Amino acid sequence: MVRSEDDTSRIVAWQNGPAVTVAYSSDFGGTWTTATDQPPSAWRLNDMKYADGQFVGVGYTDESPIAPFVAISSDGITWTYISLASEFVGFDQSRIVGVAYHQGTWCLTGWRRTSLSYADKEGIIMTTTDFSTYNIIPVPEMRMISSVMGRQ
């Protein structure tokens, strides 16, 4: 569950199950409404943050090819879902599991496979300011990076 820090006091929550459901509340959790745009049924959300006037969620598709995605919303109601599959060509079954924000930069964390063996993977940090271009920083010393912290 993530709460906006502006005057809307909107709360966004999600559940993973047979399908992801994203919902929002504008009365501090008294009533909940399903968000207008839902991710495809085989996608899974792992983490979400609110910063810089927007909600940002990260996850991965649970269908072949497994690939990370980003979910973006300025209001928690209408969402844009961006597949990051093109950023992971040659790295099948990669995951993005964490998101943080610091001074205009979003940081996404997770792992990518480096061979056909499931055990061969390296941690990654992806940075972006606009969700259209990404800088991928491999961290081969770590098999997965689950979270980073940023100060808003």
Image (cartoon, grey):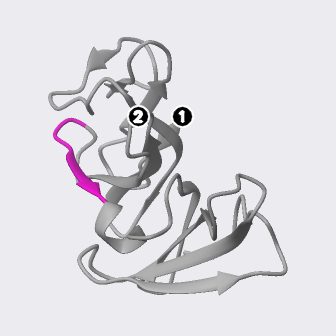
Residue 78 drawn in magenta: yes
Q: In percent of the image, x 28 and y 83: which residue is there? A: 133
- Image height of 66 relative to 145, above or below: above
Q: Which residue is mark 1?
A: 1
**Closer to us: 99 or 118:** 118
Residue 35 drawn in magenta: no
Label 2 or label 1, whichever comes before in sequence order: 1
Give the magenta part as a residue range: 77-84
Q: In percent of the image, x 55 and y 54: which residue is there? A: 95
- Residue 88, image x and y in percent? 42, 69
**Closer to us: 140 or 38:** 140
Q: Mark 1, residues whose alpha carbon is within 10 Å: few (<14), some, or many (≥20)?
A: few
**Closer to us: 66 or 130:** 66
Is 114 left, or right, of 105 in this rendering? right
Disc assigned to residue 12:
2
- Image height of 85 relative to 36, above or below: below
- Residue 137, image x and y in percent? 58, 87
Residue 44 in view: yes
- Residue 39, image x and y in percent? 27, 33
Q: Quadrant of the C terminus?
A: bottom right
Secondary structure at numbered mark 2: strand
Q: Are marks 2 and 1 in contact (CB under 8 Å)?
A: yes
Q: Quadrant of residue 139?
A: bottom right
Is 92 left, or right, of 87 in this rendering? right
Q: In percent of the image, x 51 and y 77: which residue is there? A: 126
